Image: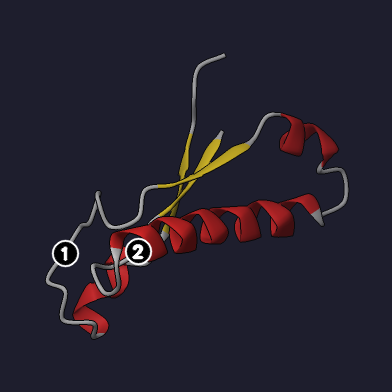
Amino acid sequence: MNIVGHTSRTGGEAYNDKLSASRSAFIRQKLGAEPGAAELLARTKTSGVGSRENLIGTGTDDAGDSLDRRVEFKIMGC
């Protein structure tokens, strides 16, 4: 499974790339804290795409952009 972090358009590209990667790493850490999660962690990777895959993408930095600030779980083939 790939945990992918996203951001809104607010901020610079380098900052958003780092923020989105941090979001996905945080979620992986939280999943890893659950009992019996060792096998899940072994099959999980993280990535961040910044604001390159926005759903709304208005850049207004309000509630309208909240869907862009997300983490997705993408199932990958073995």
Q: Is residue 55 above or below residue 43?
A: below
Classify residue 61 by image quadrant: bottom left
Label 2: state its secondary structure: loop
Q: Is residue 44 above or below residue 67?
A: above
At 28% from the left and 57% from the top, the residue drawn is 51
Location of the C terminus (image quadrant): top right
Location of the N terminus (image quadrant): top right
In this rendering, position of residue 35 left or right of residue 1:
right
Label 1, label 2: how many angstroms apart (C-alpha)?
A: 11 Å
Check the image and name the residue furthest to the bottom. 62
Given the image, on which type of amino acid does mark 2 rest?
Answer: Thr
Horizontal and vertical percent position of residue 17: 40, 55
> Which of labels 1 and 2 is toward the front?
2
Q: Which residue is mark 1?
A: 56
Horizontal and vertical percent position of residue 47: 49, 43
Given the image, on which type of amino acid does mark 1 rest?
Answer: Ile
Classify residue 34 by image quadrant: bottom right
Other-residue count near label 2 (Cα within 10 Å), few / some / many at <14 / 14–19 / ≥20: many
In this rendering, position of residue 34 left or right of residue 30:
right
At 35% from the left and 64% from the top, the residue drawn is 7
Q: Which residue is mark 2?
A: 7
Horizontal and vertical percent position of residue 3: 52, 44
Other-residue count near label 1 (Cα within 10 Å), few / some / many at <14 / 14–19 / ≥20: few
